[in-house]
Image (cartoon, rainbow, N blue to C red):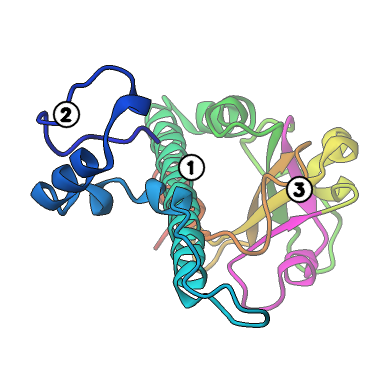
Amino acid sequence: MTSKRTSTDWPRRGHASSLEPESVRAYLLENPEFLSDNPDLLAQLQPAPVHNGKNVLDMGQIVARRLGDEVSRLRDQHEELLAVGRANQAAQNQVHGAALAMMAARNFEHLIHIVTRDLAQALDVDTVTLCVEAAGDGPVRAPPNAPMGGVYVLPAGHIDALLGPVSPALLAAVASGDRQVFGPSAGLVRSQALIRLAPSKGSPPGLLALGSRDGGKFHSGQGTELLQFLCRLLERLFRTWLDLPS
């Protein structure tokens, strides 16, 4: 962080070492906000000890040191908040781009292609798949009118087993992805985001699965609002293209 000067009237007497203490004192008296505008200087202050006796604490130095530590802590906290804000903005932009791409689908098959082929790049992940549970205990068959690439049919109850019976999403680091969910890409998955899909009351449960080779891409502490927004849009598009009831 670059310090800023409060006034342009700083004594100009050549090199800083030639400044006289009286000049510095006069400048600070005329510009009392200088140190508050330049808090990084507080950590550099070295006040002379008031007491030189053995085992006597110099409270002035203790306070100055704590103030310097507090300034450093607040600066680190500020930088962390800025980094989180930038990451959230980037994630929002990615989801908005993915949403626009899905809305541009020409038909249902094109929508599936966009989700399972194009969203990986838009969301900066390595694989995106769609899953749907088989109805009842019957044989597992491909969903009608959908290309098989990136679309997987799961045994009945498998989504509840993955997410829990009520959880809308699961974000976690994993040693490897579920092959039933990610297919041949399961081996490269080190973190995953699984979001429940429920396009219609009469349709079987579904799942949007995002996988990344970056083990820190998804974790349990992340919010899921943006991904759930994407899934709610996908549900609406499914209802539109397949003429499903709400």
Secondary structure beneath label 1? helix
Q: Are marks 1 and 3 in contact (CB under 8 Å)?
A: no
Residue pointed to by mark 1 = 87
Q: Is residue 190 visible?
A: yes
The kind of residue tagged 2 is Pro
Which quarter of the rendering shows the C terminus? bottom left
Choose mark 1 or mark 2, whichever is in front.
2
User: Is 162 rendered above or below residue 4?
Assistant: below
Residue pointed to by mark 3 = 191
Q: Which callout, 3 or 2, points at the residue further toward the start of the chain?
A: 2
In the depicted view, which residue is nearer to us: 92 or 87?
Answer: 87
Residue 55 percent location from the top left of the image = 67, 82
Secondary structure beneath label 3? strand
In the depicted view, which residue is nearer to us: 166 or 236?
Answer: 166
Q: Which callout, 1 or 2, points at the residue further toward the start of the chain?
A: 2
Which quarter of the rendering shows the N terminus? top left
Residue at the image point whose x is 41% and y is 24% from the top: 106
Choose mark 3 or mark 2, whichever is in front.
2
Q: CA distance from mark 3 to mark 2?
A: 59 Å
Secondary structure beneath label 2? loop
Mark 2: few, some, or many residues within 10 Å (few <14, many ≥20)?
few
In the depicted view, which residue is nearer to us: 27 or 161?
Answer: 27
User: Does the magenta-highlighted stretch encompass residue 168?
Assistant: yes
Q: CA distance from mark 1 to mark 3?
A: 18 Å
Residue pointed to by mark 2 = 11
User: Does the magenta-highlighted stretch encompass residue 52?
Assistant: no
Span colored in magenta: 149-173
